[in-house]
Amino acid sequence: MKFDQAGVDALMEITQRPELVFVRGEGSWLEDHNGKRYLDFIQGWAVNCLGHCPPAIVQALAVQSARLINPSPAFYNQPAMDLAKRLTDASCFDRVFFANSGAEANEGAIKLARKWGRVHRDGAYKIITFDHGFHGRTLATMSASGKPGWDTIFAPQVPGFPKATLNDLESVRALIDDQTVAVMLEPVQGEAGVLPATNEFMRALRRLTQERGLLLIVDEVQTGMSRTGTLFAYQHSGIEPDIMTLAKGIGGGAPLAALCAREDVCAFEHGDQGGTYNGNPLMAAVGIAVFDAVSAPAFLDAVNERALQLSTGLQALSAKWDMQGERGVGLLRALKLGRGEGGAIVQAARDRKPEGLLLNAPRPDLLRFMPALNVSADEVDLMLSWLDEIIAQVRR
Ligand SMILES: *Cc1c(COP(=O)(O)O)cnc(C)c1O
């Protein structure tokens, strides 16, 4: 197949992309327009939790699209109710609002907290978020994010998001005033380079927010749906947050997100929240297929086995190549390179012949691994041996 330059020129330029057009995917493998295959440890930025084109999702889309795609969010549909029931049964939350992206679910969480503050806390509206946090690309979620430089690109920001330091309780306490309504964080900061909040920090944060009458919001867009080896990452610390957002994994690659909340936090009045596509049965049917796959005990066992295998393998590579170790939770892991060779490794891995390897370097000195949750043991071993080969090539 020829590379379609005219098609490329018709797309708005928002990032640098390699001259590759992906035409097909299956499990942990992608194929480009030249027929070259790639082992994929990016998986659409951790969205394809069941790999590319999993039969369960293909089937759900085929069946539901032939039955009912969208009756309008002003009416009930059974798939939305069935998925909401699954999520509330499996978590500490009582109610779910479905959205289409992580940013939109987080925008909803911010609105819900502000509404709750208006009703119950005398108009308190500030939400403490964290340096290096990532919550999405709408104006409010960019303002809530702590990515360096994001405070000025589209200035002025949406006000009310003071930034604390992850795993530093005193930095949170110091920011609380009578206008504070909530604290919001990723249980593992993904875009920042896979930085986990410790279980102690999560528990201390829950105690502090309870003492001060604040809501605790967990952004589980990247960590939810078994990515970290439990269905939701907050479960590692045994706490119960007030609000949780999900996206990425819950759609298995299709656009689906969820805003989950405890009953006493659900302060929206009619008209406060909505969206044309919210809770559409087509995406809800996909969400059900994904949920039923990733919540099975045997599935979670396999995620934890692969996570241990990946972690052990990365530690061995780190020791061999004099790097600074690895970190992460479940199948969201990072290798600390100790030098700025991340970009070179990503490119050499992609260019590898005859088969390529897709990796992500969220920072120049770090590689992030987000394989499909059903990646096989052989595929993890293959990735590790190819990575070893590529590091040798880059260091040469
Ligand atoms: C990806 C991500 C988002 C944004 O999700 P979109 O679907 O891209 O809007 C928000 N929060 C976290 C933690 C993420 O990883």
Image (cartoon, rainbow, N blue to C red):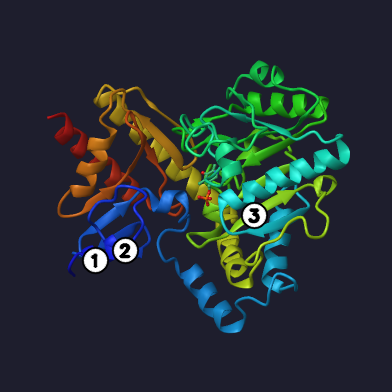
Indicate which disc, 1 or 3, sits on the residue closer to the N terminus: 1
Residue tagged by mark 3? 258
In the picture as drawn, the residue positioned furthest to the front comes out as: 156
Report the amino acid beneath label 2.
Answer: Ala
State whether residue 186 appears in this view.
no
Residue drawn at point x = 25 percent, y = 26 percent? 320
Report the amino acid beneath label 1.
Answer: Ala
Horizontal side of residue 23 vs 234, given as left or right: left
Is mark 1 in CB contact (under 8 Å) with mark 3? no
Q: How far apart are marks 2 and 3 (CA)?
A: 32 Å
Q: Which mark is residue 6?
A: 1
Q: Is mark 1 on a helix, strand or loop?
A: helix
Q: Which is more toward the observer, 177 or 235?
A: 177
Q: Distance between the residues labelled 1 and 3?
A: 37 Å
Does the residue tagged 2 have its C-beta within 8 Å of any atom of ligand 1? no
Residue drawn at point x = 69 percent, y = 59 percent? 86
Q: Is mark 2 on a helix, strand or loop?
A: loop
Q: Is mark 3 on a helix, strand or loop?
A: strand
Indicate which disc, 2 or 3, sits on the residue closer to the N terminus: 2
Residue 153, x across and y down, in percent: 47, 37
* Few, some or many residues within 10 Å of mark 2 (<14, 14–19, 20+): few
Q: Which mark is residue 10?
A: 2
Question: Vertical placement of 9 versus 375: above or below?
Answer: below
Horizontal side of residue 97 vs 63, given as left or right: right
The N terminus, quarter of image: bottom left
Does the residue tagged 1 have its C-beta within 8 Å of any atom of ligand 1? no
Q: Which is more toward the observer, 96 or 5?
A: 5
Question: Vertical placement of 263 versus 21: above or below?
Answer: above
Report the amino acid beneath label 3.
Answer: Ala
Q: Which mark is residue 232?
A: none
Residue 382, x across and y down, in percent: 27, 47
